[in-house]
Amino acid sequence: MTTRTPIPAPWHGDPYADAVRTGRGPLFLRRTDGWLLPLEVERWCAEAVPADMTVLERCQGPVVDIGCGPGRLVVALAERGHPVLGVDISRAAVTRTRRAGGAALCRSVFEALPSEGRWGTALLLDGNIGIGGDPRALLARVARIVAPGGLLLAEAAEAEVDERLLVCIDDGRGRSGPVFPWARVGASALTRHASAAGWRTAEQWTASGRVFVALRHRT
């Protein structure tokens, strides 16, 4: 039985929803001590780039994009003939994905999803390994979503970090949302947490300075 987890509020309203609707930043994750992590809204709202394509060409079977955002990967996969569903808790992101021609569902990954246990590939890109602030719990959840032996393609932080954060979404101009938990993990930490959650590392690569890891669900 899937445990129902409340959907965090920050991704529903301003300033994130406004940035997704307009396709423009600036937008940041701001830590409680004032540290800022820029969010690449313009890249997310554009078409898939060559670094993204190195991930998409590795996808197998039907694909679920967890935290799909404005849907560039969902659209690109659909154009390549993959059955694909985007999942995101932001209504603005889901709306933008659908308007671009992609299939998307407004729901948390910790809620029941269609075709659980039958997806060939799951995606956790653009920092989405941080969802919920507990990478190991997230990876265990994704293991229940993919089919036995299924594939997870995840993006790690460029730095070798393993940290739990309390952050808010900030537009850099005085507007911010409520505080919520997040996480950042580099490739080493990601593979360590993945192993504990039932995954084995199949591949690791870098493209345009971004770090990706392919994980295979143990059966």
Image: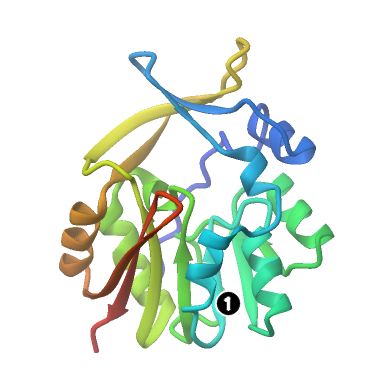
What secondary structure is found at the residue carrying circle 1? loop
Please state, as top left, top right, bottom left or bottom right, where the N terminus lies in the image. Answer: bottom left
> Does 63 appear above or below 94?
below
Its colouring scheme is rainbow
How many numbered marks appear? 1
Q: Position of residue 143 (x, y in %)?
A: 34, 74
Left or right: 176 in relation to 123: right
Residue drawn at 31 percent across, 42 percent down: 184
> Quick one: 130 or 9, which is closer to the camera?
130
Residue drawn at 68 percent across, 52 percent down: 70
Can you tell which quarter of the image residue 85 is in? bottom right
Q: Position of residue 108 (x, y in %)?
A: 53, 56
Left or right: 145 in relation to 68: left
> What residue sits right under mark 1 in the picture?
114
Residue drawn at 69 percent across, 49 percent down: 93
Q: Is residue 169 visible?
A: yes
Q: Position of residue 7 (x, y in %)?
A: 53, 46
> Does 74 appear above or below 150?
above
Residue drawn at 29 percent across, 48 percent down: 134
Q: Is residue 1 visible?
A: no
> Quick one: 176 or 191, which is closer to the camera?
191
Q: Residue furthest right?
A: 99
Left or right: 150 in relation to 13: left
Can you tell which quarter of the image residue 177 is in? top right
- Residue type at mark 1? Pro
